[in-house]
Image (cartoon, rainbow, N blue to C red):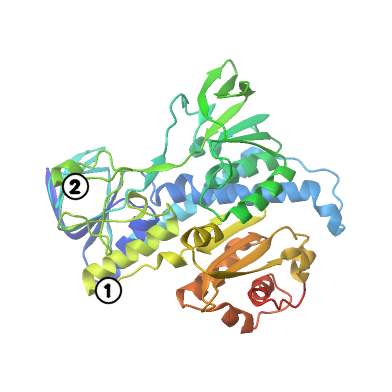
Amino acid sequence: MAEHKHDLLVIGAGPGGYVAAIRAAQLGLDVACVEKESALGGTCLRVGCIPSKALLESSERFHEAAHGFATHGIKLAGVELDLPAMLKRKDKVVTTLTRGVAGLFKKNKVTRYHGHARFEGPGRVVIEGAEGAEVVIAKRVLIATGSSVTPLPGVALDGDRIGTSTEALSYPEVPEHLVIIGAGVIGLELGSVWARLGAKVTVLEYLDRIMAGMDSELAKAAQRVFAKQGLTFNLGVKVTGARVEGDGCVVEYEGGEPIHCDRVLLAIGRRPNTEGLGLDTLGLTLDSRGRIPVDGHFKTTVDGVWAIGDVIAGPMLAHKAEEEGIACVEHMVTGYGHVNYDAIPSVVYTHPEIASVGRSEDELKAEGVPYRKGSFPFMANGRAKALEQTDGMVKILAHAETDRVLGVHIIGPRAGDLIAEAAVAIEFGASAEDIARSSHAHPTLAEVIKEAALAVDGRAIHL
């Protein structure tokens, strides 16, 4: 087998891996990255974040044209769905971005290997590709292999009628009835897409609430909005099976009648991709959830091996993996590198969007942290009224003694963009008063954040 030597080998070209590879190259290392898929970008870019957002945008425009334009004085003779064209646009967006990553590798002189990577001891990785195997010898190896869908006993995935988010991004026709198992981010986003396009959507969730881990006040508000949009929720149920029957599917759960539907989307979560990496040849032991233990600088217990992203503890977010990748390689080279996990936002790209950063009110209560709360509704914001998007609110949680911002939670128009201000505020240790005293342009949605900060001290102006 041919042997190649590099300063750093990154296993996985998802958001964490490819960003880490580029940053390491910028720092002067001879870097290589191995990816088993033909397209770069990982699950997020190929069959996750990007294609789902493309469909969310397209379906939202379709729904607005069919149901919302009249309010703005725009009359249409009729609106017709061209699903193949919508899916083609989604694929074009993905292709453009994956090619962009390849261009960035070329620009930064990152060597790309195509195949499955497997350790044969520390610093030695075998890459098995279509044209045979080759070996990479590297002083440093960074594992960034991401995650995959968590299976559910009794749910027989067939890659068509009963599938995962990958299949749900490319249904050839709008299902009459789509059953989603799991009321998390993925299920709700894709459920929103197909509901807007005309599907009946039923969501089955094992817990007694949707979006576990999110601030419960926001989750309850979101569920009310989704219910108005036509999504049906059945909470606190245990799904025991799902199978294809004839031209449709049957979903069974404890305590209820079987549900007959057209398609089933399994979306109960994701698990780290650590199988098949040959970690046993390193003597590397995984934790109880199959994740790779690392220290504060992403180093494993094996010298010369690091890990980031979905294969280690923490939320499975693309931007979390990116920050970890940069901090990891910067620490390798410079001795410095840090991620502030309190300042990493999360976003649900439904309509309205939902975004959070920092601690939730539930967490503060459980930990006995004294706090003050300020909230302000989009209903009282001029820009939101002009947009005809007034559902939702901003909630700011600040320490009762220091006024330092501990958490910000938003449900409303463009929440995913608005949360950036809150993330910066937490990163720099800002107080609610700092936000309240900062000028926010009028009329903008960002004024809702200012008013929520004012409300922490009981002095909101427009409420």
Q: Which residue is pictured at 23% across the width and 59% down the height?
A: 299
Amino acid type for the residue under numbered disc 1: Tyr
Q: Which mark is residue 52?
A: none
Q: 349 above or below 252?
A: below
List x then y, in percent, for residue 203. Answer: 61, 36
Image point 62% across, 41% down: which residue?
191
Which numbered disc covers residue 284?
2
- Can residue 172 be seen here? The reply is no
Q: Is 86 on the left-hand or right-hand side of 8?
A: right
Q: Residue at x 62, y 62 (%)?
A: 410
Looking at this view, is 70 or 222 the one in front? 222
Q: Residues within 10 Å of mark 1 (few under 14, many from 20)?
A: few
Left or right side of 105 for 376: right
Identity of the residue drawn at 25% across and 38% down:
276
Point out the image quarter for the C terminus. Answer: bottom right
Residue 265 image offset from top left, x and y in percent: 54, 34
Depth check: 461 or 149 in front? 461
Tell me which numbered mark, 1 or 2, is placed earlier along the sequence.
Answer: 2
Q: Which residue is mark 1?
A: 336
The local crowd at label 2, few if under 14, some if 14 to 19, many if 20 or more residues have their Cα within 10 Å, is some
